[in-house]
């Protein structure tokens, strides 16, 4: 009887150690979000940090954008009829007002509340990305095409679908390929329109690579 008890204890210890080892191999690092909501919170902060604030310049075709009627001085800098705030253009701000129930005025555009910005960002970027995949990290990056460019060509949509459908690669590799695809798009855009988009190319490429550096650990 004593021998059987010892054997049982040994077996239990072996099983316990084996399970612990398996779990350790699949453990999510403590620094990573454990839910969609936590990932989106991290993403919102990241996008806002990259986006900056008000813009009234003419970089990358901005001269063609409809300007707001607002003029404001912040920290000694005067913005004369800015066309963009937090990556949201004034026409987009106007168009989405009925959907989200806010007033189109200078206060809401200049001092855009975070909750309002998040609704607009989710609608423009995340919702569209989720039509391609339910992986929120991949969907968020696909959505960044819509956020930055407004649309994705049929050819690039097909390339995205092919990357997502490739069963031989991991989600991490899918993210890498999606980022490389968009970097190629940026390069072709700048090559085709060097005067308009050439000055913005380095910033676009750096931002694409920053997404990889900051979020690739969220997928495996």
Image (cartoon, grey):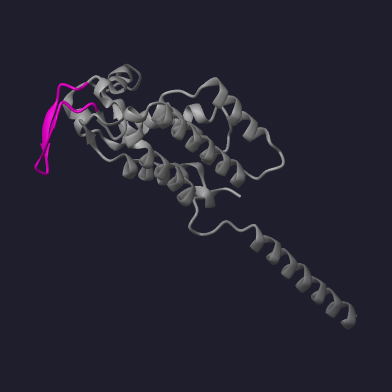
Q: Which span of residues is magenta-colored?
A: 67-83
Residue at (77%, 67%) from the top-left corner?
15
Residue at (33%, 22%) from the top-left corner?
100
Position of residue 125 in the picture relative to residue 66 (left or right): right
Q: Front-most of 192 and 80?
A: 192
Number of numbered discs on residues: 0
Indicate the quadrant where residue 44 lies: top left
Q: Is 71 drawn above or below residue 95 in the view shown?
A: below
Q: Is 29 drawn above or below residue 87 in the view shown?
A: below
On the question of residue 147 being in view, the answer is no
Position of residue 108 in the picture relative to residue 127 (left or right): left
Residue at (43%, 47%) from the top-left corner?
210
On the question of residue 219 being in view, the answer is yes
Q: Residue 112: percent from the left, percent from the top?
A: 24, 33
Q: Residue 72: percent from the left, percent from the top?
A: 11, 32
Q: Is 217 drawn above or below residue 87 in the view shown?
A: below
């Amino acid at each position: 009887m004593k021998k059987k008890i010892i054997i049982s204890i040994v077996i239990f210890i072996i099983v316990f150690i084996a399970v612990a080892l398996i779990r350790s191999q699949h453990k999510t690092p403590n620094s990573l979000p454990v839910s969609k909501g936590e990932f989106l919170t991290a993403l919102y902060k990241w996008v806002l940090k990259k986006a900056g604030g008000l813009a009234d310049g003419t970089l990358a075709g901005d001269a063609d954008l409809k300007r707001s009627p607002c003029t404001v001085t912040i920290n000694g800098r005067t913005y004369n009829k800015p066309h963009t705030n937090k990556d949201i253009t004034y026409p987009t701000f106007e168009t989405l007002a009925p959907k989200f129930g806010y007033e189109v005025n200078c206060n809401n555009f200049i001092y855009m509340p975070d909750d309002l910005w998040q609704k607009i960002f989710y609608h423009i970027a995340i919702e569209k990305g989720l039509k391609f995949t339910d992986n929120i990290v991949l969907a968020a990056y696909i959505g960044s095409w819509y956020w930055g460019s407004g649309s994705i060509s049929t050819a690039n949509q097909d390339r995205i679908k092919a990357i997502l459908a490739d069963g031989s690669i991991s989600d991490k590799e899918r993210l890498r390929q999606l980022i490389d695809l968009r970097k190629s798009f940026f390069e072709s855009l700048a090559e085709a329109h060097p005067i308009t988009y050439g000055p913005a190319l380095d910033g676009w490429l750096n931002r694409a690579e920053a997404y990889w550096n900051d979020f690739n650990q969220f997928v495996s």
